[in-house]
Image (cartoon, rainbow, N blue to C red):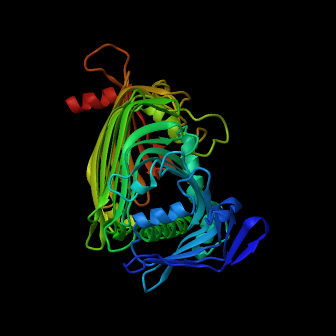
Amino acid sequence: MSIHPGGRLRIARPEFLPTGAEPARWSGRAEAIEATLRLAPLLAGRVEIVRPRIVRPDITLTGRTRLQSSQALAAAAFGIGDPGKALEVTEGTIHYDDGRARQMILTGLDLRVVGAETPGGVAIAARFDAGALHVKADLALDDLRLLGTSGGSPGRISLDVAAAGPEGELPAELRDLAASGDVATLLRKLGAGIGLPSLTRIDAEGRIAMTSSAVALEDATFSVGGVSLDGRARVAVVTNEALLPRLRALQDDAERAVVEARAAMETDDWAAVPIGTDWLSQVAIDFELSGQDLSAAGVSFEQAALDLSVGEGAATLFFDGASEAFGTFRTAATLSAADAAAHLDLSSQIAGLSLEDTVEVVTRFATDPLVGTPQRPGGRLDAVARAEATGRTLGDLVDSLTGSASAHVAEGSLSGGNVIATLDSLAEGREFMTEDKGPLIPSAGRTPFDTIDMQLAFAGGAADLSRLTIAGDRYRIDMDGAIGLRSGAAEVEGNAILFSEAETEPAEQAVDLPFGVGGTLLSPVIAAGMPTVAADLARTTAGEAE
């Protein structure tokens, strides 16, 4: 220890050990402790430290560390709880050692703890790297002494997530991920797409509790991108392990999964992406959010609620809401472990969803078109879907998918061409695919419809389109076929029928145009067959009558 002019104190290479009779669950050392001694109290025989700073500490956790009253008193000795004092930590590192391996938890930890005006109150500002993420955390507690109790302390917390810098002891496979900022960039793009300033920052106020095995925020108000929601959040470990190391291990697993999935996608091998389920039995998560009169991306939600529950080998997500643009919707999904594989159970119901508003939101995430603005379909969608699948990879899930989906759309329009005008031109004698005529090009414009009805069944790695009918003024389109779920390859046949303008019942057919749809969902190829026009239809009908 050395004391310098002005009462500056420096303790070189200190070591830290917990006090108490219980086995030590942590230990640490630092490059130095620096502080300033107040001179006036020394004359009275008292030692008073001002703004202590711990330089480059390296803390190792070896078990479930509990916040005890003695630790709160030790914190008070450093000035925590005194509004005129503060504790600082610079460039800290936290490890976890379970006796078999030493795991990196946090690096680059900068911490500042300042006492608040209320007894026991503290304000904590922390900056650190956790894997590929850089986290800025601000925490204010009304009473630090209540943090380790089941009821917790009233408080406020803010988290802001960005990509970590290239420095630090990141595994090699995570360095590219950190440098590219995939995780944080994705969240920011999603936030921009739905009209929120950022999904990487969250603010919350409620009762905050922290024990060795759980962190909870109860009776809370969450704010994300200016949208406020009520709810609660609790994360706990179910194994005999400390919470922080387990969460960091899960984060590392998730980041590696992102790297592997990205590599698989780049080589067009998405089907090989594995579905992990070990984490379902390692943590317990309860997360609930709800709100009313919400607004994002210019869309108002009368109400919305989200529940996420993880534990005992399963994760369940429930989401429902109502809005003028998206109608009413309810979705439930469960992912569970089944004999070293993942089992997915999904059900969804939508009523009154606006196709135009939905496509407008979705296109915010797409690449801008090279020319012009793409037209959007119109209409209101009602749909019901139920499906389940089991497998170890995404490909397995697709191949084993079973279930069904039905949809009904009312009073809308389709972009890409005017079907009525196209069929009218055929009724008037238009020719195509002759020596001097090319393929049939649809007339420009939109096609209004009265209804669209669709029925799908999933089995054997394919979606069986048993019925798709589009009906409007003077026309009807009927389609059936199958679509490969892995390849997206389509094998669909259909007929586009134009009815005469005469008000007869039933209406007479003026044109019957058969067609086929091949290629893939992303690059469909539509081939028209030879149309049958009114005169031919009349002869065919007369022949059948004879």
- Relative depth, front residue between 351 and 4: 4
Left or right: 401 as drawn, with respect to 120? left
Left or right: 520 as drawn, with respect to 451? right
Quarter occupied by the C terminus: top left
Please say if 440 is above or below 245: above
- Relative depth, front residue between 204 and 21: 21
From where the camera sits, is residue 434 visible? Answer: no
Residue at the (26%, 27%) spot, across then down: 542
Residue 288, image x, y percentages: 35, 46
Residue 284, image x, y percentages: 32, 61
Residue 490, image x, y percentages: 41, 52
Residue 52, image x, y percentages: 64, 64
- Relative depth, front residue between 273 and 33: 33
Residue at the limit of the structure toward the left, as seen here: 546
Residue at the limit of the structure toward the front, as seen here: 44
From where the camera sits, is residue 357 visible? Answer: yes
Left or right: 393 as drawn, with respect to 120? left
Residue at the (61%, 70%) spot, across then down: 92
Residue at the limit of the structure toward the right, as seen here: 5
Please say if 213 is above or below 101: above
